[in-house]
Amino acid sequence: MKRQTAIILTVVAALLCGCPGLVMLCSGSFFALASMTPGAQIDIFGSNSPQSALIFGAGLGCLGLLGLLIPIVVGFVTLRRKDESTSIPAEPLPPTA
């Protein structure tokens, strides 16, 4: 894979997965902190219990971390230098007797 293609794939993955993942991570921490605030007005899909806000926040945090890991993995896989010794030789091997 060419270096320029690898950089483009990494940037696209960062924009499509990393940015929403960062937003989800921040939102999840906001919901988790709101669940621990005494007297907070909580309404998560019709439920007003702090436990539902904490579970929703933890779920968003996990999805956000997953979204942040995707561009890191894509960048590592596409931008690493491949070892030349493990490549297939260009000429055929001689027959063995």
Image: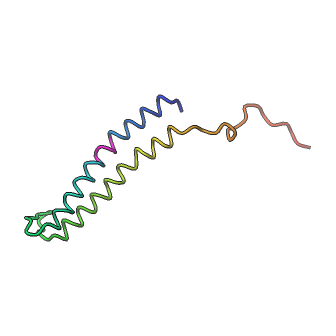
Q: Which residues are magenta?
A: 16-20
Q: Is residue 37 inside the magenta stretch?
A: no
Q: Quadrant of residue 16?
A: top left
Residue 67: x, y in percent?
35, 50
Vertical arrangement, residue 71 with respect to residue 65, above or below:
above
Residue 38: x, y in percent?
11, 69
- Residue lying at the far right in this picture: please name it: 97
- Considering depth in this image, is 75 or 36 the residue closer to the camera? 36
Residue in view at x 23 percent, y 61 percent? 57
Residue in view at x 47 percent, y 31 percent? 5
- Considering depth in this image, is 55 or 88 the residue closer to the camera? 55
Residue in view at x 16 percent, y 70 percent? 50
Q: Is 68 situated left or right of 38 in this image?
A: right
Residue 42: x, y in percent?
11, 64
Visual colour scheme: rainbow
The quadrant in which the N terminus is found is top right
Q: Main secondary structure of the magenta part?
A: helix
